[in-house]
Image: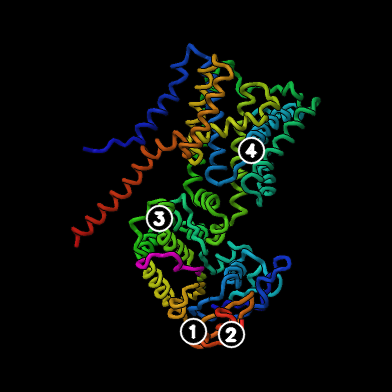
Amino acid sequence: MKHVDWRWVLTGSALALAVSAPFLLSGYPYWLHVAIVAYFYAILASSWSLLAGHAGQFSFAHMAFMAIGAYGSGLMGKYWGTSPLTGIVLSTVLAGLVGLIIGVLCLRLKGAYLALFTIAFSEVLRLTLNAELDITGGPNGLDLPPLLATTSRVPYYYLMLTLLLVSLGFMYWLAGSRFGLFFRSIREDEEAAAAMGVHIVRYKVLAFVITAMIAGLAGGVEAHYIGLITPNILILGQMSIVIAMAVIGGIESLLGAAIGAILIQFSLELLRELGNWRLVAFGLLLMLTLRFARNGLIYPLIERLVLYQARRAVIEGREQKAKQAGEGA
Amino acid sequence: MELDVRDVHLHFGGIRALNGVSFTVRGPELIGLIGPNGAGKTTLTNVISGVYKPSKGAVYLNGERISGLPPYHIARRGIGRTFQVTRAFRRMTVLENMLVPAMALHPAGRRQEFVERAHEILRFLTMDHLALEYARSLSGGQQKLLELGRLLMLDPDVIILDEPFAGVHPKLRETIWEFITTVHQQGKAFIIISHDMETIFTLSQRLLVLNFGQLIADGPPEQVKEDPAVIEAYLGKEDE
């Protein structure tokens, strides 16, 4: 009997569910909104997983790059009259440029030093946005015009879903290419990677630039969808949520981090009645994950169902080849 | 191929780690680098591979100065090395470990060709069956073999091995020995650091002896064995 290929079964089911969600949730616009926000966090968590889990750069500046995308687009529209689309594109590039600068400045920093540096950068940005009342609106935030000329959430839903799938697809391509191989070799051992000919500086900075651009793009789209961005998005608690989503999903798995983000976002909404206790539960889950399941809760399942099958396919292919060669001889 | 180490000094604050080390490797020589603990052996390999920039003096490869270049550049120029403590990429598979140097060296190369080459090398190292295993699941000796395999994927002209036989099972030791002699016959130069005197004296064609950052002997093993300065470095002076 042929083995069931769970990779395709699961991917197909998840895609079908995601595409049909607006119809399934047609009477529940609030839950459609939750899904859009969940996809937004899924983009952030998976891109942070690429930076931290794959490239080993444990940065706390991810929400700052997201905010640069959001504020950048809003301010360009306010002062230069750019359209939301142009603003999003330009602010994505801006986030990449800032990522380049931060990446270069962080080249020699690792672990706690890198974390502290990026926290400081986020705080400087947050305090600046807070202080510049005339320009950014300060704590009241900055209003942004809608990206799409519609009051319906459905087009935004598909837009954010597309953004998630495209960014995941791009990141998977990257992770599977030589870039991903070099990212992981740097994560494992910078000195050994350099001794193997890997240009450490180039790939560390590249990881920052790419993930900053993805976060910036997501931030721009989300801000135009919500219509408001405030400096509060930059508080450490927000960044911690993204990190927790990635860790619970599986820090080394892009898909694990994305699924983790979606499940956690929905769980937080479902448990809203519990008030702050849901965050306590969420924190406990994070602690338990770090203590007992360092690969996260989602990633082991993916590894079991997907990677195991992929490996078995390779081994079976090789055995088949050897058998054919034996028969030929 | 010519590797020329010219009057290399390296100071860490007031400590003189290397003090005027000079030697030349011409063609596929098999060189042993020995010396008591703290003599500067690993420091010297770090200078050659670009981890440290010499305070004075320089290293030349085929007439071109390589000291001051970043390690990745020196690796691409043709100097490969292993480390005293094995540094396999533990959370990557054996095959992925093998692909890193090949893809760094040939960015436009075809992955499939690298994969085939990697399997070929892994077969030679008797570990092809482990290709899809994570490096962290390998024994210490197997991780050392993997490091050697990675070096072959890098295909350098000069291979520096830091304690390749330390803590290795006798069977794997034979494989490493075979690796060195076979690859040497294919035209590669070796600089091997080892504390295992019997092995290094048997294996090497030429021995370099470091003591307190200075090269105190350079010659064939039989000659070095009788050198009073070497005997003194290892055993101390008679009146001590």
Q: Secondary structure at mark 4?
A: loop
Q: Tell me the subunit letter for badge 2.
A: B
Q: Do the numbered discs 3 and 4 sit on residues whose CB atoms are within 8 Å?
A: no
Q: Which mark is residue A60?
A: 4
Q: Position of residue A33 (x, y in %)?
A: 55, 19
Q: Residues within 10 Å of mark 4 (few under 14, many from 20)?
A: many
Real-space Cα distance between discs 2 and 1? 23 Å
Task: Tell me if I can see residue A131 in this picture.
Answer: yes
Secondary structure at badge 1 equals helix
Kindly identify which residue carries mark 2. Answer: B238
Rounded to the nearest whole Å, what is the CA distance between mark 3 and mark 4?
A: 34 Å
| Mark 3, other Cα within 10 Å: few <14 / some 14–19 / many ≥20 | some
Which element carries disc 3, helix, strand or loop? loop
* Eye-nearest disc, 2 or 1: 2
Q: Earlier in the sequence, mark 3 or mark 2?
A: 3
**Label 3 is placed on what type of residue?**
Leu
Task: Give neighbour class at mark 1: few <14, some 14-19, many 20+ (Cα, 10 Å).
Answer: many
Reading the chain from its start, which is encountered first: label 2 or label 1?
1
Q: Which residue is mark 1?
A: B221
Q: Nearer the viewer, residue A165 or A148?
A: A165
Q: Which residue is mark 3?
A: B138
Q: Which of the chains bears the disc numbered 4?
A: A
Closer to the camera: disc 3 or disc 2? 2
**Amino acid type shown at disc 4:** Phe
Q: Nearer the viewer, residue B46 or A175?
A: B46
Please tell me which residue is depicted at 18% across the width and 58% down the height of the picture: A327
The magenta stretch spans which residues? B161-171
Q: Say whether mark 1 and mark 2 are on the same chain.
A: yes
Q: How many marks?
A: 4
